[in-house]
Amino acid sequence: ETGVTQSPTHLIKTRGQQVTLRCSSQSGHNTVSWYQQALGQGPQFIFQYYREEENGRGNFPPRFSGLQFPNYSSELNVNALELDDSALYLCASRWQGKDTEAFFGQGTRLTVV
Amino acid sequence: GQQLNQSPQSMFIQEGEDVSMNCTSSSIFNTWLWYKQDPGEGPVLLIALYKAGELTSNGRLTAQFGITRKDSFLNISASIPSDVGIYFCAGPSNTDKLIFGTGTRLQVFP
């Protein structure tokens, strides 16, 4: 039990559609990161939010965007879905001052058809 | 960019055996984290290492932060069936994002 929950757990979308994934962080954690994990791969960093502002981004196009809210929840939005966006999407929360002991949610499995 | 390479890629062992896996990088890391991921689940933090040379245990798991700060090792003693999963090393990049290794898939046979 990591205290980080994601919704929904599974989702099927059509190419070209838009999707919003949600994450509820551990209480008190001021930093949330989102990762994309393709089958058989390690998680790839999408972006990170600290105190509701994006403060780091990986090699993902602008159609991947996010929001972080004061109540420790956050969202990942993906526009114009492509087949290659099919993956497990993970959020991880941590307390910025405690370096990098990030705690992950169970993930959202997104399938784009 | 910074990358973490793990070996072996996969392991098939018998219950009761000890397991060793490692993680190497071409650049220095100041923190090493080891995670375990079960199928369809998010990674779960096992051990965190913060100092070069540090040796830390968590039950049957022991991890070490390499002296060069470019590698880390994870050992599992007396493996049991629930040790099955994928083990990832991870560390913060120089831009503070968490980078994951390629993973070691562990299979334990009774």
Image (spheres, coloured by chain):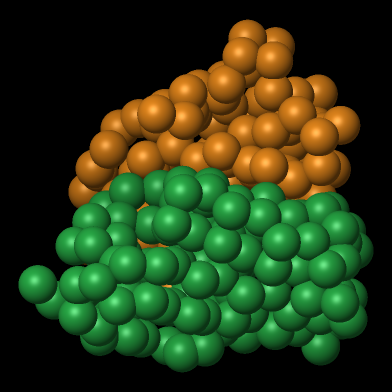
What residue sits 30% from the left and 56% below the top? B38
Q: B7 or A92: which is nearer to us?
A: B7
Q: Position of residue A19 (x, y in %)?
A: 40, 41
Residue at position x 19%, y 62% in the image: B81
Residue name at image x 69 percent, y 74 percent: B72
Which quadrant of the structure image shows residue A61?
bottom right
**Residue A13 in view of the camera:** no
> Which of B61/B23 is in front?
B61
At 51% across and 71% down in the image, what residue appears? Answer: B75
Tell me: A80 left or right of B49.
Answer: left
Quarter in which the N terminus of chain A is drawn: top left
Q: Position of residue B39 (x, y in %)?
A: 26, 58
A15 left or right, relative to B53? left
Residue A4, visible in the rendered structure: yes
- In this image, A22 relative to B97: left or right? left
Q: Decide: is A47 above or below B17.
A: above
Image chain in orange: A
Q: Position of residue B46 (x, y in %)?
A: 52, 50
* Tally of numbered tags: 0
